[in-house]
Amino acid sequence: MANAQDLYTSGTSPYPWLERVLGSAAEAVGARCAAVAFADNGSHRLSRVASWGPFPVLKGGMAVARWVAAQGKPLALETRQQASQVPGLVLHRGEELPLICVPIESRDGVLGALQANVPSFGDDEDVSHKLHTLELAAHLVGCILENARLEEKLQEKEEDVTRLAKGNIHAQEAERERVCLEVHDGVAQTLVSAFQHLQALEDTPLYQMPEAKQLITRAAALVRQAIQEAREIVNSLTPASLRDLGLVATLRQEVRQFEIDTGCRVELEANWPRLAKDSEVALYRIAHEALTNVRRHANARRMRISLSQEEHRLVVQVKDWGRGFDLKQRDLSATDHGTGLFSMRKRAELLGGTCGIQSALGKGTTIRVDVPIVE
Ligand SMILES: Nc1ncnc2c1ncn2[C@@H]1O[C@H](COP(=O)(O)OP(=O)(O)OP(=O)(O)O)[C@@H](O)[C@H]1O
Ligand SMILES: [Mg+2]
């Protein structure tokens, strides 16, 4: 038997809907009382999860419902004599008749049963009408549960994606740090000593030979260029100024270069203290991505970046008056159009905050990141 019990106790409880469906169905068939029962976790026992009217508390409990759920077939019983003719059904004392009981099914199988006790049965047509009504109600209950289950699965998937994305961000930062360290302390240092050796050659007789001098000078220039390139790699992975001077000074430098490159006028309002390293790195990456997006997509003549402190929160706002885009056409939880906006959100969430994106075609884009200050 499929299991509905764990769903029933989950966050997305379908309970209020079940009660409404049960109540309406019970009224429609003129029932004295009615109940919905589901299979317990991993067992064939049924537990009542919703009831309507004075449904009796049965010690032996729900023999008919259990039988119906096990067989997956509806049952209408008027007398104990009829009940005794149903193979395998043992009625408990206190189980009132007449009753109608129908299975509740989902795609995964039978979840439980819906049972209603009525004052009396009329003719065959009356019984089949009541049966049909209760079957419809049971179908609806099955759909409600199915829906709740799908919602829960979707939520789990979203949580998985978020966990993966956050793990990815952590791994990316760790990898950047590792590469920075290796290039800075490894390749760059080796190049520096190679350069010193080449300089030392200038004091030897070899340097007096025109051909050797030319080769040494050329080699020294190449090594100097390689040192510069190694520094640029390190800087592009994590700007040295972020470590040394902090987020605001680093952004000022980037903004200056951005204005020269693009001709876009940037107002930068920043009044911030130094923050914890992780926060500075995350907020820098967010602001950097927003700036890169303006450079690549916005074609803006003007933009504003503000870093402000509002009570116990830090707010980064990047606004441009460029071409904007249609947010409805972007699924920001997916990464099939690029990862920039997606990872901005995840970085903000990692800091316990939010990242709101507003954009409209022809009206520009605003990114607003709001994170708590970590003491
Ligand atoms: N400031 C902006 N102005 C106009 N369009 C933008 C802006 N920011 C983002 N977009 C639009 O949203 C899309 C998604 O941006 P996102 O940063 O997620 O990806 P990307 O920049 O295309 O690639 P990636 O950042 O992964 O290198 C962009 O391709 C662009 O169409
Ligand atoms: Mg981008």
Image (spheres, helix red, strand yellow):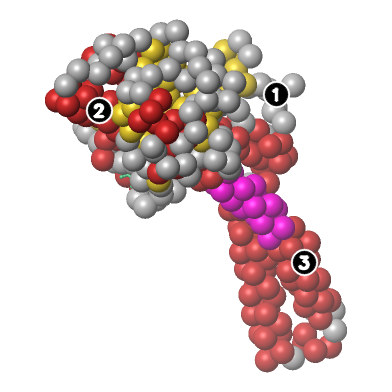
> Which tag is nearer the camera, tag 2 or tag 1?
2
**167, 54: nearer the viewer:** 54
Task: Indicate the secondary structure of the residue bearing disc 1.
Answer: loop
Task: Give, as a three-letter code, the residue at label 1.
Answer: Val
Mark 3 residue crowding within 10 angstroms, few (<14) / some (14–19) / many (20+) = few
Residue 164 belongs to the span the image colors magenta: yes
What kind of element bears circle 3?
A: helix
Q: Nearer the viewer, residue 181 or 351?
A: 351
For label 1, being within 8 Å of ligand 1 is answered: no
Q: Earlier in the sequence, mark 3 or mark 2?
A: 2
Q: Which residue is mark 2?
A: 131
**Rendered location of residue 7, percent (x, y):** 50, 33
**Mark sitting earlier along the chain (1/3):** 3
**Residue 296 x, y percent position in the rendering:** 35, 47
Name the residue located 56 percent from the left edge and 35 percent from the top edge.
45
Give me the residue at 72% from left, 31% from top.
Answer: 276
Amino acid identity at mark 3:
Gly
Position above or below: 199 against 317: below
Q: Which residues are magenta?
A: 162-179
242 on left or right of 360: right
Q: Vertical placement of 137 versus 88: above or below? A: above
Mark 1, mark 3: which one is toward the viewer? 1
Name the residue: 54% across, 15% down. Answer: 57
Residue where numbered disc 3 is placed:
186
Q: Secondary structure at mark 2?
A: helix
**Residue topped by disc 1:** 374
Residue type at mark 2 is Leu
Location of the C terminus (image quadrant): top right
- The residue at the point 14 percent across, 25 percent down is 125
